[in-house]
Image: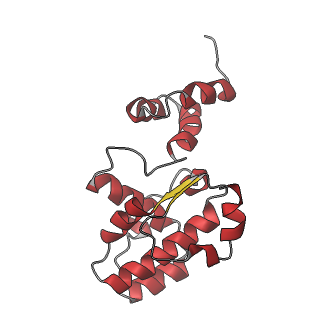
Amino acid sequence: MSYLNKDILFLLFEELQDDSKSLFSCLLVNRLWCETVVPILWKNPWRFDHINYQNKYYLFIIITLNLSDEIKESLSSQGIKLPSKLQYFPPLFDYLSYCRSINVNVINDIINISSSSPYNKFLLQQEVYKLLMKKCPDFRFLDMRSMEHQIFYFPEAIIRFESL
């Protein structure tokens, strides 16, 4: 059987980057394909048309699993409901490290899942943006039409936004 190396697979899968259904199917073929497709899917996880409530909740889980225990404890003490580590397996990949964009509207929708209090939403948004600044190495797109935070003042922001 012939073998395609990871670089060739990546080039092929990049051609499918707008076809999420095919990419999601490729995730299930084998470990190599999965490792190759995940960075493409997570380059812009907010763009898919099928981001419904259930999918937003899964994005919320993945994001919050990346928060430090101190931040989770602080947010929980404010009454913000976060998924427990005990309920979910640790992620197989560092998904946020593949992210190259921020879409404020989708992030706000995701955050609305956890809290109805405007103050709590604000706190959680701030922590999510800080997390994205730390974990996402190279932003290519920033949709900030409805951003309430001055993320440019976060310590990592200058480095992260150099490529915009």
Number of numbered labels in the structure image: 0
Q: Nearer the viewer, residue 104 or 24?
A: 104
Q: Please give left or right for residue 159 compared with residue 36 in the image.
A: right
The quarter in which the N terminus is drawn is top right
Residue that protrudes farthest toward the top in the picture: 1
Q: Residue at x 67, y 62 (%)?
A: 160
For residue 112, side relative to residue 154 (left or right): left
Compared to residue 11, the image places residue 139 above or below, namely: below
Residue 64 placement (x, y as % from top left): 46, 68
Return the x and y of residue 156 as percentages of the image width and height: 68, 71
Q: Is residue 107 above or below residue 9?
A: below
Q: Height in image: 124 above or below 103?
A: below
Figure quadrant of the C terminus:
bottom right
Residue 88, how many percent across, how many down?
Answer: 41, 60
What residue is at 62 percent from the left and 27 percent from the top? Answer: 11
In the image as oriented, which residue stretches furthest toward the bottom?
77
**In this rendering, position of residue 42 left or right of residue 162:** left
Side of 118 where 27 appears, left or right = right
The x, y position of residue 50, in whole percent, is 31, 44
Give the residue at x 42% y 31%: 19
**Colouring scheme, one of rainbow, by chain, secondary structure, one colour:** secondary structure
